[in-house]
Image (spheres, grey):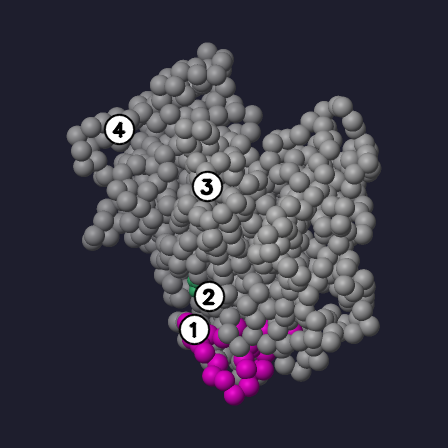
Amino acid sequence: MTAWTVIVNAALDTGIHKHPSLDTWFMVTKKSTYVVGASADGYVVNLHWGKRLTQLDNLNATVTPKTLSQNPPITYALEELPAFGGLRYREHALKVDLPNGIRELNLLYSGAKIKGDNLLDIELHDGNRTDFKVTLHYEVDTENDMIRRSYTVKNGLSDRVNLDMALSAAWHPPTALNVDEKRELLTLAGEWNNEAQVQSTELKPGVAHTIESTRGFTDHVSFPYFAIRQVPSDVNPGTEVYFGTLAWGGSWEITAHTNTYGQIRITGGMHHLDFGWTLEPGESFTTPVFIAGFTDEGIPGARRRVPRHARKYQQASLQTQKDDSVYHPILYNSWEAVTFDVTYDKQVSLADKAAPLGVELFVIDDGWFGDRDNDSAGLGDWYPSKKKFPNGLKPLADHVHDLGMKFGVWFEPESVNPNSNLYREHPDWVLYYDGVPRYEARNQLLLNLGKPEVQDYIYDRVSSIIEESDIDYIKWDMNRPFQGVTMHDYDRNPREAWVLIARGYHNLLAKLKKRFPDLWIESCSSGGGRMDLSVLEYADQVWTSDNTRPDARLTIQYGASLFLPPRAMYGWVTDSGEDDNVHIPLSFRFHSSFMGGLGVGANLNNYSEKEMNETTGWISLYKRLRPVIQNGDLDWLVPPSREGQFIAASQTTSHDQQEAVILAFRMNSPFSAALNPVRPRYLKDDALYRVQIWLEDPYKIAEEYTMSGALLMHKGISLVGLNNAMFKSAVIYLKESSN
Ligand code: DGJ
């Protein structure tokens, strides 16, 4: 669609349209529409969010006429950007400290511009002081029914202005239609080793639910993701879901508040705690992007859309050659096997063992640099340890390349041990407050990435190592929360440090990607502490959790698959799950890691010939199935549960529905009943599918038959091999066939 196209009485195309006579804009996606408009008195409000509209309906923007003294209409208006000020008493998104002690804004419509097919800017000005301006930015992802929102504030005053809170957007799912309509909020909670645990809670009037990280980065304690779904009842089928996520790598918050009128407001963006940004006259500031969408296909519909959206923006932003025909490599990483005990000889010996298994990327983890024999020294000194690698990393890289694998290296560039040359030389490069203890966590402090000289040092060291040693992949780790966040020798607001650091991190990743377009980057923060949509614009993949026990991993992957593209969600097969307390077969460990990018982290030195052979078989099967696994849509047929934990099953389906990979798990079989058949979804009713099932042996198809899509989806797949035992699992491959 071209800008300003007006269509009346015809089905609306996807894209952005202005109403012919009203100041309303229709953002039309494949299956949804989002409408904003300016009311007669200038308030910019949401007029529709949900089902796709076919007409440019006359949606007059009026502010709810509730005139009781305690219910000011503006409080109940569905303002796109509710700023602190006037009689607004619901969640705010923006608060500004203006000259003369004034801290109120009254943002009013002053113009709009459609830019290209999918961008819209709406201009607001402060009705109290006309030269404070805000531009609301909208970007429409038509295929995935999602809208990306942010805004820019511009200080047109002749005095300095401070931002005290600058959340990215407010969203308003429609008001509940009747008292029976219940809605549930889905969020993701966690801790280190226990990421992305799905939580659900009923939305109740008068209650605000906030999820957040105040630690300076995305973190494990919560993930910036929400989904609000109708709870099915006798009066509604309960399939509508509003869902969203932030593209921001610093501290963040999302709040969902419900009132007794059934209105819901969701606000979110950079955490306001200790946030501050100063705008000198003429300066502007743009918030991170808050993305949200609508589907009437339930949580599976939301689970399909966010990962696809993330992948789309990952590809657009990285602009590397990694389209869907380039598969994420199967990696070997020795961290769990040998921790810091990395030497040239020991890594060579592991590489020699990994290559014949079919491994494609060999990664050396922590311990290769400085005086790093344990976690108390060396961080910051990004020079290969003379003791462990007397000739640098290049000989190891050459050896790995000669074996036909790519070579990867671990870094934790933001961190520094006080016991390091870098800290001795630059004690002022870390985050600290004068006269306050520099609290160490894991014996380390954080460098201030807001400082250009710190960014330069990191960029120089990481890129030198990449160049000198011919490195194909880096794992960028970060293992402690922020403290002492300020800027020294800085004539601006020291609270800006929170934003400068988050931007500094993204800037570094972007610079590295630009210089080394083929480089693979994995984002890690003590496992899955940094897996948000902003990091995915620079990194190819994330390390989902340090917890590699496969049954734990199922619940982690269940949550993480709500927002991660499958190819970015890495899982390693390790020795976790095989010790004195628990025996989880290698097959089960592989099958749980088959859900995304595959890694091996076991101690290959202890592997028997049988285990090596089995590993080779699973890797080879994974390679065959990975076009579906890495590029398909991952959904869950049976969600894993933390209570009981008896069964779980996932299905990844190719976009053309011609292929699917089902992974089925039985953790326990305490009752005599057989496992119910697992019923696939998303197949074509009228197509025939060849079904192949593997159980414990990668070289032996345990069962094989052909069945129609309709029957498969109705009758399900019987998996008798999963009965009467603990930790049994199956891989099922469905492929459309002509007979
Ligand atoms: C934390 C990461 O999550 C691990 O995979 C490993 O790289 C260690 N750091 C190394 O210190």
Nearer the observer: mark 2 or 4; the answer is: 4
Q: Viewer-proximal residue, 206 or 274?
A: 206
Please give the name of the residue rendered at 80% of the width and 52% of the height, measured from the top-left corner: 110
Q: Residue at x 44, y 16 (%)?
A: 710
Answer with mark 3 or mark 4, whichever residue precedes in sequence.
Answer: 3
Q: CA distance from mark 1 to mark 3?
A: 40 Å
Q: Residues within 10 Å of mark 2 (few under 14, many from 20)?
A: some
Q: Amino acid at mark 2?
A: Asn
Of residue 39 and residue 713, the one placed in the foreground of this image is 39
Q: Are marks 1 and 2 in contact (CB under 8 Å)?
A: yes
Q: Which residues are magenta?
A: 426-451
- Whether tag 1 and tag 4 are in contact, CB under 8 A, the answer is no
Q: Which mark is residue 479?
A: 2
| Residue at mark 1 | 441
For label 1, the SS is loop
Label 2 CB, ligand 1: below 8 Å?
Answer: yes
Closest to the observer, 704 or 7: 7
The image quarter containing residue 165 is bottom right
Q: Which residue is mark 4?
A: 675
Say which amino acid is labelled 1.
Ala
Dominant secondary structure of the residues highlighted in magenta in the image: loop
Ligand 1 image position (quadrant): bottom left
